[in-house]
Image (cartoon, helix red, strand yellow):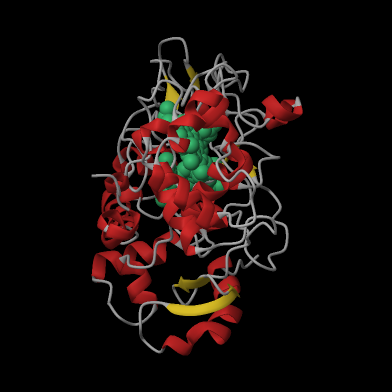
Amino acid sequence: MKHIPILIKLALPLLLTACGGGGTSTTDVGVTSAAWTWSLPPNFPVPSVPADNPMSEAKFQLGRLLFYDKKLSGDGTFACASCHLQILAFTDGKTVSTGATGQQTSRNAPSIVNSAYHATLTWVHPQLFSLEAQMETPLFAIDPIEMGVNDSNRAIVLQRFENDADYRQRFSEAFPDATTPITFSNAIKAIAAFQRALLTGGSKFERYQRGEASLNAAEERGRLLFNSEKAECFHCHGSFNFNDQVNFLGARPTENLFHNTGLYNIGGTGAFPANNRGLIEFTGVASDMGLFRAPSLFNVGVTAPYMHDGSIATLEEVLDFYADGGRNITSGPHAGDGRLNPFKSDLIALIDLNEQEKADIITFLKTLTDDSLLTNARFSNPHP
Ligand code: HEC
Ligand code: HEC
């Protein structure tokens, strides 16, 4: 059976409607309110925005201030940006993250770039559909604690913003109809607006797609392999966002949201480590063991370590893992041959890739890094 890369299927209709920019790097499309105009790369669809949280520049700027502000955490020591650093494409470079009180999360901090387009949020959660809903976890979760906001310090946290004339004015401007603008609900809406606008557009691959750059021989070989039935990558990383579950204005629901890639097979039973078993934790269905969301591959060149638990250190090891068709752990508490995991996706199997071919795919993956985003002043820390 011949598979047509999803990339092409998704990109075509959009190119027809959105190529008015003619060679410029962004196109203004989908003006949804007087206060906001999307600047999107030509092949990016218009993000879907909740009806009760329309975009505005005032909200974006307030959200940016809050995202970088430690005042938003219970004890005033932690900001969203403590675990989502711009220079690392809004990841933290750690295997798993450490929260405000020193507790570790069980997961690796994912990039929040292009999260406007995620159909579901986090490494696996079949019902987490909006950035607003997702934010309840880092703000209020008690196990593990991330920002550490709870019933006993909620009022104190809000008072920090009430006491600040600049914040008072900005909350009022961002939420002009609200009688009490400074609330957690509004802080969440503002940060979500900031995140929705955090989009790539300047990577070498995107410039290549617009005819503004050309790929060298190794990058082009890697691109062809990535999209080939030999390496299979595009089946799960083939959308315009280099994953397989995307949401945008007018998108149809995506199927097959989660996959088991054969990272573990503890004791040969198919099991994954206790704190990180994947979709089964929500469904209780045995075959959902070890299923996680395929992440976007934009900026993977700077987001090591990899996978939901940060258990693969380098892109070289990621390619060895895929070429082997899974990971064989020979000793320790997680011992077991992931290549034989009974719940592994059919698309993960031994691939006959030589060292040159693995290197070419990595060279291609590095064209997905948007250096301009990593240093873009519009997304940087606004506090002195
Ligand atoms: C202690 C470190 C830490 C802090 C602080 C933190 N995050 Fe995260 N963030 C994570 C981790 C770890 C995950 C992955 C969670 C999972 O998969 O269960 C995550 C996931 C996310 C996601 C989902 C991205 C995706 O690809 O689906 C978003 C969005 C996000 N965080 C935004 C925020 C915002 C906004 C804040 C501040 C209110 C914040 N984070 C604070 C560590 C942190
Ligand atoms: C069956 C679907 C599937 C296929 C095929 C697939 N991937 Fe993945 N990929 C995933 C999933 C799911 C994850 C996350 C797994 C986890 O954390 O447990 C992932 C993770 C990754 C990561 C880590 C990203 C990060 O931010 O941690 C990279 C890099 C990657 N894949 C590249 C590739 C390449 C290159 C290929 C082709 C050789 C490929 N993938 C084929 C589903 C797939």
Give me the residue at 37% from left, 32% from top: 70
Whether 250 is drawn above or below 272: the answer is: below
Residue 35 % position (x, y): 53, 70
Give me the residue at 27% from left, 62% from top: 372
Give me the residue at 41% from left, 37% from top: 80
Pick the front one: 217 or 58: 58
Identify the image quadrant of residue 203. Answer: bottom left
Pick the front one: 152 or 269: 152
194 vs 55, left or right, is left
Identify the image quadrant of residue 304. Answer: top left
Pick the front one: 101 or 281: 101
Whether 266 is drawn above or below 314: the answer is: above
**Quadrant of image for the N terminus:** bottom right
Residue 220 % position (x, y): 32, 69
Residue 18 % position (x, y): 52, 83
Whether 57 is drawn above or below 305: the answer is: below
Instruction: Answer yes or no: is residue 361 visible.
Output: yes
101 vs 375, left or right, is right
Residue 206 % position (x, y): 37, 70
Instruction: Answer yes or no: is residue 262 visible.
Output: no
Q: How many marks overall?
A: 0
Whether 182 is drawn above or below 223: the answer is: above
**Quadrant of image for the C terminus:** top left
Give me the residue at 36% from left, 78% from top: 25
